Amino acid sequence: MQQISIRPNEKQVMENLPEGDTRILLNGPSQLDILFLLMDPYKANIEIYLDNDYASVNLLGTMLASNEDIIDISITVYHYGDNGKSNQLFKGIATDKGRIFFKSKVVIGDKTAGNEAHQANHNLLLSKQAIVDTCPELEIYADDVKCSHGVTTGQLNEEAIFYLTTRGFSKEEAINTLLEAFATEPFDSDTYNKFIAQKLREFK
C-alpha cells in the first residue's frame, strides 16, 4: 500500500493517483485537492484520513469508459478531527461495453464536531451494454455535522438535444456540446477540458 502524508498548513494538488491501494493522512489544518481524469482501465482503493482539526480534501473527477474498459474506484474518507471538510464530485460516461464501478464512503467519527462532507456522482450511459454501478455511503457517529450525497444515472436529455438543433446545431454537434459540458464540470482547467473534449469525439 502506498502511503502519503500531508503536513500541517500544507496545500497540495495531486493528479490521477496510481492504481492499487493508497492511504493518505492529512495532519493538522491542511488541504488536499485530487483530480482524476480516467480514460483507460483503472482500479484503485483510496483511504483518506482527516485525523486533525480543520483538514480539507476535494476529490474531483471524470471517468470515461469505452470499448470493454473497466474503471473501478473506491474512496473512503474518515473524519476523525473537528471542523473537517470533504467534497467529492465525479462524473462518469460509459459507452460500448464500458463499465464504471464507483464506491464512495464517508465516516464521521464519534466525539467530533463541525464536520462537513458532500458526495456527488452523476453518470451517463451512451449504449445499452454499458454499465454504471455507483454506491454512496455515509456512516455518521456524531450530531454536529453537515452532510449530503447524490447520485444520478441516465441518458442524454432528448429535449436538450432538440433545443440545440433549433438553435443551429447539427444533432452531432448538440450531443458533443452536451457531453462536453457534462464531463468538464469538475474541472477548472483548459488543459483537462481539451483532453476530455478530444476523448469524447470517440464516444458514439
Image (cartoon, grey):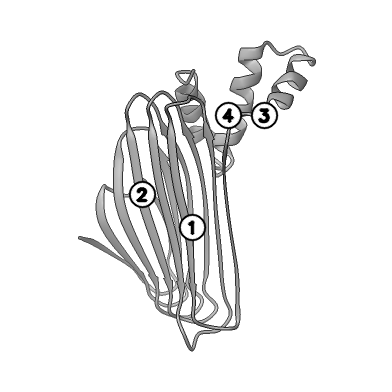
Residue 30 appearing in the image = no
From mark 2 to mark 1, how far is it between C-alphas? 12 Å
State the residue position of label 2. 73
Q: Please determine whether, in this image, residue 107 is positioned above or below residue 99.
A: below
Could you tell which of marks 2 and 1 lies nearer the N-terminus? 2
State the residue position of label 3. 157
Could you tell which of marks 2 and 3 lies nearer the N-terminus? 2
Q: On the image, which quarter does residue 190 sit in?
A: top right
Report helix, strand or loop for mark 3. loop
Report helix, strand or loop for mark 2. strand
Q: Please determine whether, in this image, residue 89 is positioned above or below residue 12.
A: above
The residue drawn where x is 29% and y is 45% is: 43
Could you tell which of marks 4 and 1 lies nearer the N-terminus? 1
Residue 13 in percent (x, y) is at 43, 54
Q: Callout 2: few (<14), some (14-19), or many (20+) C-alpha neighbours within 10 Å?
A: some
State the residue position of label 4. 180
Residue 156 appearing in the image = yes
User: Where, quadrant-wise, is the N terminus in this rendering?
Assistant: bottom left
CB under 8 Å between callouts 2 and 1? no
The residue drawn where x is 63% and y is 27% is: 178
The residue drawn where x is 35% and y is 40% is: 71
CB under 8 Å between callouts 4 and 2? no
